[in-house]
Image (tube, rainbow, N blue to C red):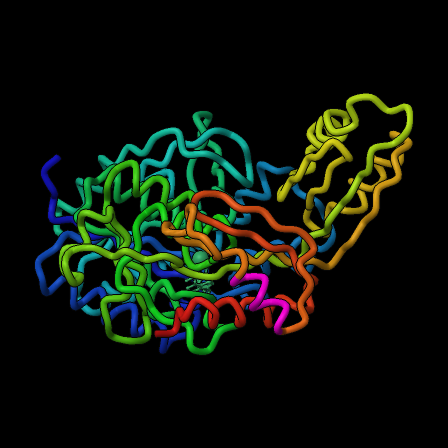
Amino acid sequence: MQKQNILVQKFGGTSLSTPEAREHVLRHIRRELARQVKLVVVVSAMGRSGDPYATDTLLESTVLNGSIPSARERDLLMGCGEIISAVTLSGMLSSEGIPAVALTGAQAGFITDDNFGNARILAVRPERVLRELEAGKVVIVTGFQGQSELGDMTTLGRGGSDTSATALGAALHADMVDIYTDVNGILTADPRIVEDAKPLTYVSYTEICNMAHQGAKVIHPRAVEIAMQAQVPVRVRSTFAEGEGTLVTQPEQFVDSPGGVVDRFVTGITYVNNVTQITVGQQEGIDQLQLKVFQAMAENKISVDFINVTPYGAVYTVFDNEAQRAEAVLEEMNLRPSILSGCAKVSVVGGGINGVPGIMARIVAALSEQNISILQSADSNTTIWVLVKKEDMVQAVRALHNQFQLHV
Ligand code: ADP
Ligand code: MG
């Protein structure tokens, strides 16, 4: 498919939260317009939880005054933050003499199912966006939103604006989707935890997808999957600094890197906090214990992770906020689970891990040097996971980052 000279820019909450931040946003818009590209700008709600127009704040009781709206109406409210951002930005552009138009998710052509709060995109019909681009306007689109086939506003769930941006990029056959945020790209670890985490120049769709699934919040995995399907390159970069950030694409596109290859062994270290480990041992007189445990979790819509099944029973994790429910379900079945709450899953992610001898030994050595006990572990082609106590999480991430020399 011929590229259309279209660029999609997405600005996250912190990039829009203050007048100074919005000046940076304008700078990026002006710079790209000077290159004669057709520009689509996807916006999140301003700020983070606690800020007046952030989505979480809109859901707080001060606005609703204790009333509980239906899922359909909750989505109407949840979409407001993005609308405020889009209108603010189009106003700023217009007052500079830059023609701009703000579109809701529905107006931009996002058709979703009616799973309110976590809707899936069924189609993107970008005709209106294309018409506005042809008319020479910057098109500002509210992220995180769509419309059901019945015409109701829906929201796309966590990371929804990233998904809006790449889905629109795919539908428009954009040259590139730029995800602007508050860090200089995708780093080898969360810079809030590892001070010397290093920005990566290139990562493959698969590498960042794995990192995002294992907790790297910098881009949502769904957004990466969509970009990968459509082969749209994505850049993750800072709103507040210069620099190209991280290019996310297929490895064959890593042309500027030395020799055209990036043969990394470990890409980064990620973590997921607030998980509870549940162990159910085989008990006298209970047949097919493992099957019954996981069927019961599924029937109660409790999502399980980090599963080890052995002839002696099963061990797995759930999120802390579902642990009590999981425990009650198991007790109802006359099982006696042991429950360990306040754990964290730390992951070593990289394409080159597969079959490398000694890698687990290095992980165990790095953690035991810090007196961190490993409560559980597992591995796949691309990832090794360890479960640790939550209070050990920061030390564990740092120790593994060091062990694999990711800062150099
Ligand atoms: P936005 O509001 O722009 O969508 P997010 O908070 O969703 O921003 O994502 C940016 C944050 O992701 C950063 O502030 C950083 O703390 C966090 N993060 C976690 N892991 C990583 C990583 N590996 N590389 C970069 N940032 C990361
Ligand atoms: Mg985000």
Q: Nearer the viewer, residue 170 or 77?
A: 170
Q: x and y percent of residue 220 in the render? A: 43, 50
Magenta segment: does it hold 77?
no
Q: Is residue 364 magenta?
A: yes
Displayed-image quarter of ligand 2: bottom left
The residue drawn where x is 28% and y is 62% is 246
Q: Quadrant of the C terminus?
A: bottom left
* Residue nearest the observer in this picture, 306 or 199: 306
Question: In this orientation, does residue 105 appear?
Answer: yes
Q: Is residue 291 left or right of residue 346?
A: right
Identify the residue shown where x is 81% and y is 46%.
324
**Measured along the vertical axis of the image, is residue 13 above or below residue 281?**
below
Residue depicted at 51% across the width and 55% down the height: 215
In this picture, is 69 found above or below 242? above
Seen in the image, is 36 located left or right of residue 112? left
Q: Which residues are magenta?
A: 362-369
Can I make out residue 104 in this image?
no
Residue 292 picture quarter: top right
Tell me if 51 is positioned left or right of 224 in this view. right
Residue 39: give x, y in percent of width and height: 19, 54
Q: Nearer the viewer, residue 225 or 116?
A: 225
Residue 100 falls in which quadrant of the image?
Answer: bottom left
- Where is the N terminus found, in terms of image quarters? top left
- Does residue 330 lie above or below 41 as drawn? above
**How far across and how far down the image is residue 169, in percent?**
26, 44
Asked whether 400 or 341 is in front, the reply is: 400
Q: Is residue 119 left or right of residue 207?
A: right
